[in-house]
Amino acid sequence: MQSSSTTSTIIIPNGDYIEQPPKNDLNNNHINDDSNFIIKNVQIAIDPIIMNGDRGDDGEDQEQIDKNIEQFCSIPGEPKDSQAELDYSIANIVNSQQHDKNDNMDKLMKEQPSCPGKLDYVPGPKIIAKNRWQKIWHLACRLKWNNIFYLTTLHVTCVFACYHAAIYPVKVLTVASAITLGYFSGMGMSVGAHRYWAHRSFKAKPILRLGLMLLQTMTMNGTIFSYARDHRNHHKYSDTEADPKNPARGLFHAHVGWWLWKKSPVVIAMGKKFDVSDLWNDPLIRFQHKYYVPLFTVLNIILPTIVPWLLWNENPLTAFYVIVIIRTTVVLHLLFCVNSVAHHYGYRPYDFRIRPADNRIINYLSMGEGNHNYHHVFPYDYRSNEKEYWEYFDPISHFIHITQMLGLTYDCKKASPRVVMGIVRRKGIPAHFDHPRSLTFRIVNAMFDWVAGSIVTLWFLYPFIIYKYMTNREIFIFRWET
């Protein structure tokens, strides 16, 4: 398909009849088919693809579109090497690892003489035991035991927390505090660590950056520096051996498994190619990275437990279970779902060749991070899709838009409809984008999406409400007790 400034040319087949010898089957019966037609190509001119009311490349130079596409598809601090050079580096590291593994195996084979009278080498019982223990030791050394301890403790405690919240009364202010902190801590992660520090999608005033840093600390998702560094790797080398999350290794690895293993030499080597000086030169990031543990302890454990006890006389154990344990576990897994589920299931209208997908359910659960195909194609864009911020359930982009009106954020980057269409024409599925809808349809559709998203986002409340209702327990305590 060839493009011009006003029209596009498409080649369609035209069949002309040409006499050919008749075909017969094994019983010498005549076969009547369409094979007597030879295809000739005929060119016709059609209007450019229309999407969201914008027409093709009218009035805009193709080189300028390519320049804009390169800008919105770039990643802060990414290596200057070409993609071929980066692929070659990854292949070299993988091959050297395999070569070292083969050398160790050959050395081990030479240490043990082969069994007499056998054509092929068969290891004896001692070498089998030795290999088994070596494998166990090697596996133990590759695990991140501190993360295993933290996550195991969190999830075991969460089981007791869910039992406590289902059996004992919980005050409505405690539930509201857990939802509010979960919402804003997720904003600290998605707006702050993700879209601001990792992608530099906008600029923010110091007071907002401080607030986003404190909120991100409450998610138990690591420091901003470590997250943004790994996330840039994830975008540059998505679904390859150099991707620390690498969804190609399975749902569990992409969801939480990559937290349990030390980084491979491929991830470390390719990660060093990134320039992350913009992150480390930020004093706010360095402060959080240095004092992360005490900050997390105070903000996420001590204050959420003591404040409800002091202000509305909530049981400290109930406050700890509901606001700290359940809220942290839920927020953490909703963030993890973007790396796992949204990389396996969904639609890929902007680039059908990559694994990240747009998944509406994950978009509801993660408050706007589920349109992952768009995000991986346009990582610089502060939005999760090309529509207006009110048309789609996207509280994160809505939050950025509100702070922009308040003057707390500025220079918010977004891809224009022409840039989006340029990518769709090259890599995506143009048929996915229908003709522009009326304003009434867009408003009704937006209302439905926001209502559905708000209902799905609160999914964790429904099991407790149903259980307490069926067992005739007081669902929430509305009485103010001091």
Image (cartoon, helix red, strand yellow):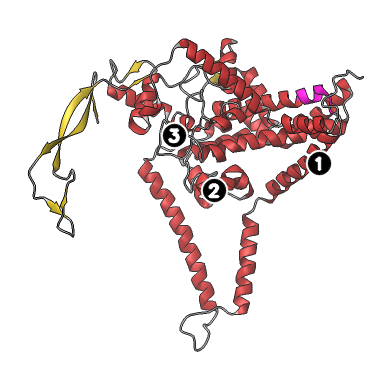
Residue 150 in picture, x, y percent from top left? 72, 44
The vertical placement of 468 against 113, above or below, is above
Q: Which residue lies under the disc numbered 1?
A: 160
Residue range corresponding to the magenta coloring = 170-177
3 or 1: tag closer to the N-terminus: 1
The vertical placement of 287 against 110, above or below, is above
Rendered residue at 51%/41% (across/down): 344
Residue 69 in picture, x, y percent from top left? 37, 27
Mark number displayed over residue 250: 2
Residue 86 in view, yes or no: yes
Rendered residue at 71%/44% (across/down): 151
Q: Which residue lies under the disc numbered 3?
A: 348
Position of residue 370 in the picture relative to residue 143 (left or right): left
Q: Secondary structure at mark 3?
A: loop
Residue at the extreme bottom of the image, as rendered? 117
Label 3: few (<14), some or many (≥20) within 10 Å?
many
